[in-house]
Structures are given as C-alpha cells and as structure tokens.
Image (cartoon, rainbow, N blue to C red):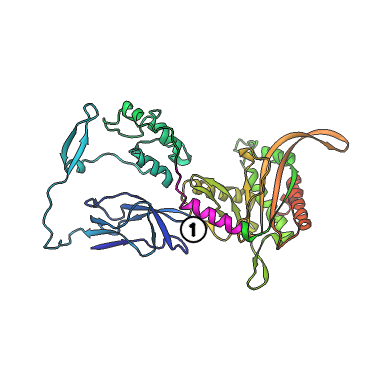
Amino acid sequence: MIEVKLHDIGEGMTEGEITHFHVSPGDVVKIDQPLVEVQTDKVTAELPSPVAGTVKEIKASEGEVVTVGTTIILIEKEGSIPSQDKQPKEPVQLKIETPSTGQTGLATNTIQSMTRLTRRVLAAPHTRKIARENNIDIEQVNGSGPGGRVTEEDIYQFLNGGQQPGILQEKADTREDVAAAKPAAEAKEIPFKGRRKQIAQKMTQSRYTIPHVSHFDEVDLTNLLELKKSLKAADPDGSEGMNVSLAAFFVKALQLALRDYPIFNAKLDEENEVIRLEGEVNMGIATDADDGLIVPVVKNVEQKSISTINREMKELIHKAKTNKLKPSEMKGGTFTISNVGPLGSTGATPIINHPEVGLMAFHKTKKMPVVINDEIVIRSIMNVSMTFDHRVADGATAVAFTNRFMHYIENPAAMTLELI
C-alpha cells in the first residue's frame, strides 16, 4: 500500500489546508494524476499520484489543516496482490434523480466508468468551494478572469442560468433546475483561514511591531506620460514601439532614490542591535489576487533596465493572479510598492511588509491647474504616500527620499542618464 503524504511544497512550509479532493475511494488513478489540492499560506498546489493504482482510503477531509508528513491518501499500486481476507465487493449502485419526476433510479458502477471530456480550470479554493456547495461542476463554467480563471461571479452567474456551459452539460442540468437552486438572500460566512488568515497574521505582526508613519505628497507625471507615449508610438520604419507601464518607471526611480537613501532599503535586527542595509534592491509588487493580497518580488532591479523590469513585473503579476507563483518568487523583498491609482484611490496609509522598512503607494492621477513660472497650466498630478518604520528613519529623511524619487519621475531624462 502506497501512502501519499503532505510533503514540503514550499520553503519552510509546515502545514497546509486540504481544499479539494480530485479522487474518491475506488477510483483508478494514473501516475502523476492530481489527487488533492492543498493551500499553504503562499500557494495552492496539487499533489500528484506517485504510482498507478486504485485509491483505497482517504484519511483526511476537505477543510482540514494537516502538517507535513501526514498521510492523506492510501493507494494500492497497480499489479499488487490484495490481502486474502478482503472479498470482492458487489458493484456499487448510484442513485440518480430524474428531473422530470423527482424519482430515484439505480445505476451500477458501469455508469461511473463512462468517460467524458474534462478540462483543468483555474480557480481559487474558495471559488471551488462555492461551486461544490451548489453542486456545480466547475469544469462547466466559463472563466472571465485572467487566463480564463473562474471567479465567484462566474459561479453565481452560472448558477442563475446566465452563462452557457463551457463543455458538455448533462441533460439533468436544465435551466429550470439552475434557477431553482438560486441561493436565498441570507447571511453568509467566509472561511477565515488559508491565505486570508496568513495575511491577517502578518499584517497584525507588522502593525504591532513597527511604529508606522506616512508622508503624503504630489508628483507631476506630465513629462513621464509624454515619454511613455513617445515610446509606445510606432517607429518610422514601421516597427512597433514599447508599451512600458508607469510602474516600471516608478520601480527604477525608487531604486535610484534608495541608492542615495539606503536606510529605506534595510532591515532592523533588534536582537543584534543593528540596522542592516541591504546590498541589492528587491522590489515587492503588492498584487490583488482572488485569494487576497500577495507580493511577488522583482529581484536585483539595480542591475536591470526599465524594459526588463517592466517585462518581469508583468510576468510576476500574471503568475500571482493565476496562482502560479513559486515560493522563491515571493521571498527576499527589501522595499515594496503598491500601485492602487488605477482602482481610484486618492490616498492611504498602507501597512509595511515586515521586516522591510518602507513602502510607497501610488494613487490616482488627475489633470489639474498648477502654477509654473507664474503661469497657470494643466498638469497630470499623482498622489503618493510613503510609509516608513519610525524606529529606523525619521520624517525629514522620508521627505528627502520622496523628493529624490519625485525628481526622477518629473525629470525622466535624468533617470535615463543614470542608466548610461
């Protein structure tokens, strides 16, 4: 008998929550076939079958938190000789409800062996749970999220009959049945565990450990927007221009400012009574994923061009939103940014990503009249907030650091000169 145990699927992982079983006792599985979905504090992973064989027993339940080394599933390896005291069982009979009459019929396990087209879908564990609670096959749902990811809204739309199935749909799933299954308006509970609980624990640790101070300012993006527009325009030879996000420029400007104010690219080691200035700039990118906030890290931005930062940042954000980040891609951050302007934010006091020292948030950009050389002109102004650890740095230093960042943003030519 083969024991399938929870192994360490991430650096330093000690436990994981079982969010969904893909198999049941009696199922015949192939090698590397997904058996169970497990969520840790950082990633959701599927444990594959190490052998081909038959699932004999499931020793845990969905929603249970198990530690590394716990046996989850027992599999009888293909070709092994079963114990002599086990007698062949009678064929399993399934109850099938007929929609038209509501009567229950019987079918043997021959029905279980019927094959149908399936597809692996992207969906958060909580979304999958909603689907299971409403007896919805998530493989039937068209995902509207990034990369075809199925969202909670997709599930409720499907439940209410507003979405056509993505693949073959059984005749019993009529529109009338779906409408009848519409959930009543009642209070709901959201599980406080998994990534949501880990986020809460880390935010609490940061808030109660670090004395937070936030500095607010306004930065003129007009010149940078013009540079971005010119880079995006097609070249005279007909080739396509470069579509570089503003956030990539922000990351490079922050790296240059951190070079002059390394106190914000540091970590406080209270036990050894030392502030450790980091030798590299690893920029955390706060990302809003379906399961909650996650922070992938662009490593060594001091060694990279703006175009390279732009490409790597987009790749990491896509991985974060599709739950494909590796643990190594979320570790080692030295400073974090939060680009909430596209969502409409005008200001905030974000919580620092402990044990880092600083976090800068970029808020809404709007055109407004400003006075330049005694003349009123229209400029594109963005709000920024710089939150820092007051144990490590003071307000005057934070203002000077923010001013240096603003200098590079408002004078992008100076930023490009630094790259030559």
Residue 359 x, y percent position in the rendering: 66, 53
Q: Is residue 213 visible?
A: yes
Q: Which residue is mark 1?
A: 327
SS class, disc 1: helix
Residue 185 x, y percent position in the rendering: 43, 32
Q: Residue at x 65, y 43 (%)?
A: 246
- Give the magenta range: 189-206
Residue 218 versus residue 67 in the image, above or below: above
The amino acid marked with disc number 1 is: Pro
Side of 218 where 34 appears, left or right: left
In this view of the protein, which residue sits in the foreground, 61 or 56?
61
Tell me the quarter of the picture where residue 50 sits.
bottom left
Q: Residue at x 63, y 45 (%)?
A: 339
User: What residue occupies the far front of the structure in this picture?
Assistant: 187
On the rendered image, what quadrant is the N terminus found in?
Answer: bottom left
> Would you say residue 126 sits in the magenta stretch?
no
Magenta-colored segment: predominant secondary structure: helix
